[in-house]
Amino acid sequence: MKSRRPVNISGKPFPIFPKLIATSFGAGFLPVAPGTWGALVAIVLWLPLYLWCSFSVTFFVTLSAVIIYGIAGTWASSESEKYWGKDPVAACADETVGQWISLLPLCGGVAEIPWWEILVSLALFRFFDIFKPLGIRSMEKLPRGYGMMADDILAGVYSVIILMALNLLIL
């Protein structure tokens, strides 16, 4: 079982920039369920787009955030392993990216997508991230930050598929 607080195994101080990225701006240090906190960071940062921007702006900014933070998070997660060991619990940038992916089908705006689907998106993403069915666990075998990020990306993709199916059935 992972410890809640990372222990520095390198003996050197972890530089602040990769630490902030890896922990989703410190959310990974919050008590109990740091992965959920990382996913909630994604929602909090995404909500202004959802509330005030058009579909196209919301979608492309979210997609850009997935790509940019996905690359930065992979690097920072790899760095975190140098200081905190393999797949440290405080490194939750992967959950932030995965949650943004799961929000992509909801980029239609308040008038088109019910607000409760944000909660469904979170629940689906966390389900897939925690239980790791359908090949998600095998993604963790990739080296360093790639494995940390890949399983959450796939969890986000599965969430997207289910949300899109729900939207076809409900709306």
Image: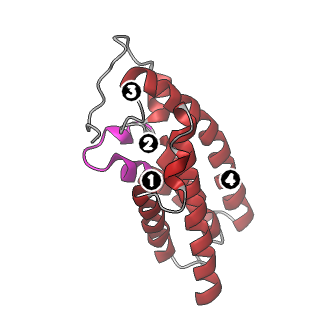
Between the residue at mark 2 and the residue at mark 1, the CA separation in whole angstroms equals 8 Å
Query: Disc 2 vs disc 1: Cβ atoms closer than 8 Å?
Result: yes
Q: For this view, does 68 lie left or right of residue 103? A: right
> Which tag, 3 or 4, sits closer to the chain's start?
4
Please give the label number shown on residue 85: 3
> Helix, strand, or loop for circle 4?
helix
The residue labelled by disc 1 is 39
Query: What is the three-letter code of the residue carrying label 3?
Result: Gly
> Helix, strand, or loop for circle 3?
loop
Query: What is the three-letter code of the residue carrying label 2?
Result: Cys
The residue labelled by disc 4 is 63
Read off the magenta span.
25-38
Between the residue at mark 2 and the residue at mark 4, the CA separation in whole angstroms equals 18 Å
Query: Disc 2 vs disc 4: Cβ atoms closer than 8 Å?
Result: no
In the image, residue 17 sits, relative to residue 169, either above or below, namely: above
Considering depth in this image, is 104 or 130 the residue closer to the camera? 130
Between the residue at mark 4 and the residue at mark 1, the CA separation in whole angstroms equals 16 Å
